Amino acid sequence: QVQLVESGGGLVQPGGSLRLSCTASGSVSPYIMDLAWYRQSPGKVREFVAGITSGGWPSYASSVKGRSTISRDNAKNTMYLQMSSLKSEDTAVYYCNAVVTSGSSAGNYWGQGTQVTVSS
């Protein structure tokens, strides 16, 4: 099993920056976990924001590409999302996702989410 805890959300002004963190706990090696960030705004479906494979390969949604950097520190079992030039449309609950690709804990896991509000 994997437990995911997000942190770093809050209120930020348009044009500002923030860094989200997601820490994974459990008995699963980070080397068999692909990690990602998703977000969901009221009335909208949850959407992919950015992902990073167990090997460190990143991918981004077009809406955040160029404004965001995803990274991970396997020694700390932690993933980060650095976002800049924030816009009001970035307001959402941001969820951490882990896909365990092998072993007895293989599956899809979600954190509880952290609220990001972009407003003046």
Image: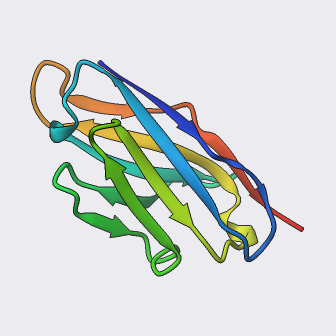
User: Residue at horizontal 63%, vertical 55%?
Assistant: 44
Q: Name above or below for residue 33 compared with residue 64.
A: above
Residue located at (58% from left, 38% from top): 113
Is 93 in front, or is 66? 66
Instruction: Decide which of 88, 7 is in the foreground and name it.
Output: 7
Q: Please provide percent x and percent y for residue 46.
A: 52, 51
Residue 21 coordinates in the image, percent (x, y): 51, 45
Task: Write the residue at 56% across / 31% down.
Answer: 112
Residue lying at 36% horizontally and 57% vertically, measured from the top left: 71
Q: Quadrant of residue 29?
A: top left
Q: Residue furthest right?
A: 120
Q: How is the image coloured?
A: rainbow
Q: Is residue 53 left or right of residue 110?
A: left
Coordinates of residue 95 in the picture (x, y in percent): 52, 43
The residue most toward the front is 75
Quarter of the C terminus within the rendering: bottom right
Decide: is 109 above or below 81: above
Nearer to us in this view, 107 or 96 = 96
Residue farthest toward the left in the current orientation of the protein: 103
Q: Quadrant of the image for the N terminus?
A: top left
Residue 88 vertical position relative to residue 110 in the rendered view, above or below: below
Observer-nearest of 62 and 80: 80
Measured along the vertical axis of the image, is residue 87 above or below residue 112? below
Res 46 seen here: no
32 lies left or right of 34: left
